[in-house]
Structure formats: structure tokens, C-alpha cells
Amino acid sequence: MIDLRGALSALVLAAASVLSATNVAADGPAAGADFKMLVEVSSPLGFEETLDRLEANAKDLGWKVPSKWKVDFQQNLMKVTDTDIGPNRVIKMCEPFAAAELLVKDEYKMLTAMMPCTIAVYVKSDGKTYIAMMNLEAMGNMFGGDVKKMSDELAPQMAKMLTFD
């Protein structure tokens, strides 16, 4: 299966079913849809602790989280715009076997544009740390077939990934 498996179902299904999640939708006709494209989850931990726990949990589940797939948005935007957006990092991770399973098929190669799975960790003005991710359940439902199967399979892994106790 694809990294979409890790990105889509793992992130959203786990977050939506295990934690209290806030759905975020863009303006437009789909804004009232049952499944939003993004899910935001509040973390009970601080910023650095959330990043560390998320990465450790992902690795424990066999996901790959190369250091080159970590982006410090706060630092990067500060360099370019001289604007401090506050702590804000992106971690990209992949469940390689899921990704390979989907990407060997021509009809799923376009999903590479959504890989690897991206998770954002940031601090809002309320001082709390949040995690945002793509809604994998919605993506699985949208694509159907093997993508849906992959999303359903990875959801339990994502739930474990978002365990902070």
C-alpha cells in the first residue's frame, strides 16, 4: 500500500477516533461536508515533547521518519519574511510497505504527490500545542478501492502514534 496509507488513514482516522479533533474546512461548497480535508488535535504535551513523542511512536510502529523530512517553518519563514509565526514544524513520515503496495500500480502513482504523510506540530496564541494532519478517512472514502482499504488498515497505527500518555 501507499504512504497515503500512512498519511491518510493513519493520521486522520486515528486522530478522529482516539482524540478530540476539530475539523477544518476551506470556504466553498464542501465546507459543510461530513469529512473535512484536515484534522486538528490538541496535544497534552509541550511543543518539543509532542514532536519527540510523535516521532518515537511512529518509529515504534515501523514508520520511517528521516531527519531530512523535518522542516522548521518558524525558522524558514523568519529567514525569508522576518515574521515570527511561533513554533511550527512539519514532520513527514512513511509506512514504506503501504506506499510500495499502492505505487506499483499505475492508477495510484498520482498519489505520490501526497506522500510522504505530513504532520504539522505548532503552538497557537493560546499557548497550546496542536497537531494537524490530512483526514485519511476522508481521503480513503474519496478514492475508494485500495486506498480505502489502506486507510482502514492504518487507522489503528495512527491512533497509537497519537498516544501521549
Image (cartoon, rainbow, N blue to C red):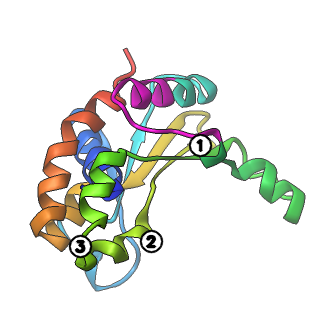
**1 or 3: mark nearer the eye:** 1
Q: Position of residue 62 (x, y in %)?
A: 36, 31
Q: Which amino acid is tagged 2?
A: Ala
- Circle 3 residues within 10 Å: few <14, some 14–19, many ≥20: few
User: Is 89 left, or right, of 37 in this rendering?
Assistant: right
Q: Label 2: which residue?
A: 113
Q: Pick whichever of labels 1 and 2 is earlier in the sequence.
A: 2
Asked whether 97 falls inside the magenta stretch, the response is no
User: SS at mark 2?
Assistant: helix
For the residues labelled 1 and 2, the Cα–Cα distance comes to 23 Å
- Circle 2 residues within 10 Å: few <14, some 14–19, many ≥20: few
Residues shaded magenta: 53-67
As displayed, is residue 22 above or below residue 114? above
Residue furthest to the bottom in view is: 29
Q: Which amino acid is tagged 1?
A: Tyr
Which numbered circle lies on residue 122?
1
At x 66% / y 46%, what residue is drawn? Answer: 68
Q: Position of residue 118 (x, y in %)?
A: 47, 53
